């Protein structure tokens, strides 16, 4: 124990400051602070002892001890700041992230073939100047049938295996799950001033199920409306699409006369293919595969879309996304598309990091 509260203050200060600079981290420094300034600390004990002094002595000794306490506090704060900075520098040094490392040891998750082909189709048509349009899955009878020149008793309705339903019990406003993406033709004409060049990829629904049909499937609709577009443009557009999509230089195509109520004339399009060693080769060969329906938009449909068929004309087509995915990637059955089987997804899925583009390749 010191003789008086103020004896040897100089060496006490030096001792504390030496202990502070020897402290290697904030914890050790905190112990130094408690030993000096804590309740039972060396400086605190001396301050307590002031109580037993005479008023004059206390005045002098008090000033000295207060100066010591303030000086030590400042020195401790300065050392704390130093230690903090050093530990931050050390963390920054040791916690560097190598941004060139792969994100995971093994990529997890794949892009579904439907998403892949959907994006491939967008990449190809966007390059030709088409934009992407959308419409609702739940449609009115008018948009799905009436406006597309399919009146209530038309036999084409039977072929669509339509899901009908009433949104409210007891109501008469029967709705449909759209059976094709063609209603987007009408919606686009209603909202866009020609020239119109859109594709509309999306979900479609028909009450049908076997190896090549599921109740929910995907289509991509195409629509071009202006004053001069003709059948030659339709054929050229679809030929360019097929070459780009199947990634071949030449593709044999056959435009077969057909019938859709919403196009006149109507054509179904087949592409040439051949079976080579159990594998389907697209482009040449003696076999044909139907891939889409198309035609020149019927005047009644242009009128239903709010445009004058005396002024405007154009073409439309509709293609099954799942179907062309099966053809391009050799997938024999459509049902597992929608079964969420991880083994199937890993086998047929695509890398999430490879975004399809014409510049970098559609399906790398
Ligand atoms: N909507 C037709 C179908 O689902 C395809 C089609 C679209 C045909 C546009 C001609 C024009 O089968």
Image: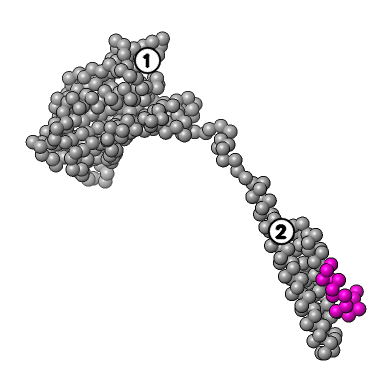
In this view, 302 is above or below 246: below
Q: According to the image, label 1 marks what residue?
A: 280
Q: Secondary structure at mark 2?
A: helix
Viewer-side residue, 91 vs 36: 91
Viewer-side residue, 6 vs 112: 6
Q: Quadrant of the N terminus?
A: bottom right
Image side of residue 123 versus residue 193, left or right = right
Count the marks: 2
- Give the quadrant of residue 228: top left
Instruction: Bin the neighbour count of mark 1 within 10 Å (Cα to Cα): few under 14, some 14-19, many 20 and up.
Output: some
- Magenta stretch containing residue 5, yes or no? yes
Image side of residue 108 versus residue 115, left or right = right
- Give the quadrant of residue 202: top left
Q: Secondary structure at mark 1?
A: strand
Residue at the image position 84 percent from the left and 67 percent from the top: 15
Viewer-side residue, 116 vs 69: 69
- Magenta stretch containing residue 11, yes or no? yes
Residue 152 visible, this angle: no
Residue 281 visible, this angle: yes
Q: According to the image, label 2 marks what residue?
A: 83
Mark 1 vs mark 2, foreground winner is 2
* Residue 125 pos. (x, y %): 30, 32
Image side of residue 20 versus residue 81, left or right = right
The residue stretch that appears in magenta: 1-15
Instruction: Bin the neighbour count of mark 2 within 10 Å (Cα to Cα): few under 14, some 14-19, many 20 and up.
Output: some
* Residue 55 pos. (x, y %): 82, 90
């Amino acid at each position: 124990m010191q003789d008086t509260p103020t004896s040897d203050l100089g060496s006490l200060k030096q001792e504390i400051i030496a202990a502070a600079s020897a402290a290697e981290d904030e914890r050790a420094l905190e112990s130094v602070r408690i030993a000096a300034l804590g309740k039972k600390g060396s400086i605190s004990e001396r301050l307590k002892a002031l109580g037993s002094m005479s008023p004059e002595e206390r005045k002098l000794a008090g000033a000295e001890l207060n100066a010591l306490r303030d000086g030590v506090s400042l020195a401790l704060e300065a050392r704390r700041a130093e230690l903090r900075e050093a530990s931050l520098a050390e963390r920054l040094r040791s916690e560097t992230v190598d941004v060139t490392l792969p994100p995971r040891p093994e990529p997890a998750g794949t892009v579904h073939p439907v998403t892949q082909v959907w994006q491939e189709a967008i990449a190809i048509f966007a390059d030709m100047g088409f934009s992407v349009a959308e419409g609702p899955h739940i449609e009115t009878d008018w948009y799905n049938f009436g406006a597309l020149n399919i009146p209530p008793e038309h036999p084409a309705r039977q072929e669509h295996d339509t899901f009908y339903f009433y949104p409210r019990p007891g109501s008469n406003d029967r709705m449909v799950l759209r059976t094709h993406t063609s209603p987007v033709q009408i919606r686009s004409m209603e909202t866009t001033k020609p020239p119109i060049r859109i594709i509309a990829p999306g979900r479609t629904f028909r009450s049908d199920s076997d190896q090549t049909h599921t109740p929910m499937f995907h289509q991509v609709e195409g629509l071009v409306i202006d004053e001069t577009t003709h059948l030659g443009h339709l054929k050229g557009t679809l030929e360019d699409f097929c070459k780009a999509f199947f990634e071949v230089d030449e593709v044999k195509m056959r435009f077969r006369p057909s019938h859709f109520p919403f196009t006149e004339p109507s054509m179904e399009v087949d592409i040439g293919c051949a079976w080579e060693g159990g594998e389907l080769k697209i482009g040449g060969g003696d076999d044909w595969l139907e891939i889409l329906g198309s035609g020149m938009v019927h005047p009644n449909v242009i009128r239903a879309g709010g445009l004058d068929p005396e002024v405007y004309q154009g073409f439309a087509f509709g293609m099954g996304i799942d179907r062309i995915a099966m053809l391009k990637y050799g997938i024999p059955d459509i049902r597992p598309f929608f079964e969420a089987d991880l083994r199937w997804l890993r086998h047929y899925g695509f890398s999430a990091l490879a975004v399809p583009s014409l510049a970098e390749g559609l399906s790398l």
